[in-house]
Amino acid sequence: MISYEILFEDNDILAVNKLAPMPVLRDKTKDLDLQTLLQREHASSKKFLEAVHRIDRRTSGIVIFAKTPRALRILDEAFKNRTIHKTYLACLEKEPIPAEGILKHGIVFDKKRNVSIAIPYDALEAARRRLPANTQVLDAELSYTMVYKSDRYFFVTAAPRTGRHHQIRAQFAAMGWPIKGDLKYGARRSTQSGLLMLHAWKIEIPHPISHEVLSLTAAFPPAEKLWTIFSQNMPDTQTSQ
């Protein structure tokens, strides 16, 4: 399996399409991570390379790396100020009804199980009474639109408006719409590739030095036939946050 492909590079940033189930940064498993792999294999990444953000180990798609401390600092601020817009594509096992909307939940992170629990706002008060004292409940919000459906699966764009742990996975699961391959959040079975059918598809990012807005799109992992089916029937989807 190809681990990554380069989408864009200059003296300040490197944009990569992650195509394998691997962490972006080194974690407690000590498995090979994308940042270390790039530092080993990509000649211009040996001096300085730091991931500006992460996607989950089993999520594919765009990851942005800074190649200078200055670019890292500026892009960190851009993420905090939400001037970077990301669009994901997810393949769901159940049809989302309605076909588009905004999901709002409270998110509770269960560290022992490494799971985020999304609680609808109208159930938060009752949930708080059951939770241990001082449990942190974070707001989570995303917009979604169904853009294609096959006989069994449903493809949606998703634009997170907050950045919570496993947010898209947890919010769709809470609605009863698990992402294909996501056993942790209720999917029926895993995928052959080991990847979730959740793809960090598009990003609009202001360049840290020139300030020009870069619009990047990441191709889907070739190992999953359903992505090929979607690509062949892909509508004109311009959705972004």
Image (tube, grey):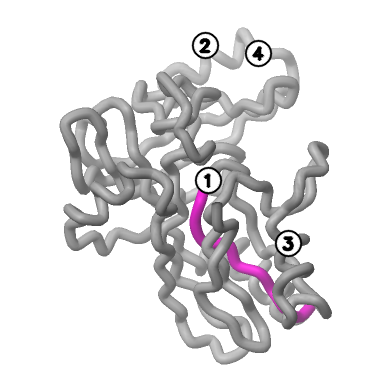
Q: Vertically, is 216 above or below 180?
A: below
Going from N to C along the chain, the mark reached first, 2 or 1, is 1
Segment tinted magenta in the rendering = 59-69
Residues under numbered marks 1 and 3 in contact, where contact means CB atoms less than 8 Å apart: no
Going from N to C along the chain, the mark reached first, 2 or 4, is 2
Going from N to C along the chain, the mark reached first, 1 or 3, is 3
Q: Can the viewer see residue 105?
A: no
Callout 2 environment at 10 Å: few (<14), some (14 to 19), or many (20+)?
A: few
**Within the magenta stretch, is there residue 86?**
no
Nearer to us of marks 3 and 4 is 3
Can you identify the residue that label 3 sits on?
A: 37
Q: Can the viewer see residue 160?
A: yes
Where residue 2 sits in the image (x, y, percent)? 55, 57
Residue at the spot x=47%, y=27% of the render? 190
Q: Amino acid at mark 3?
A: Leu
Left or right of 98? Residue 44 is: right
Can you identify the residue that label 2 sits on?
A: 126
Q: Amino acid at mark 4?
A: Leu
Where residue 191 sits in the image (x, y, percent)? 45, 33
| Element assignment for label 1 | loop
Where residue 155 sits in the image (x, y, percent)? 28, 42
Nearer to us of marks 1 and 4 is 1
Left or right of 139? Residue 29 is: right
Left or right of 6? Residue 229 is: left
Left or right of 192? Residue 55 is: right
Callout 3 environment at 10 Å: few (<14), some (14 to 19), or many (20+)?
A: some
Residue found farthest to the bottom: 210
Where residue 210 sits in the image (x, y, percent)? 56, 91
Residue at the spot x=46%, y=54% of the render? 200
Residue found farthest to the top: 130
Q: In the rendering, which numbered label is found on residue 59?
A: 1
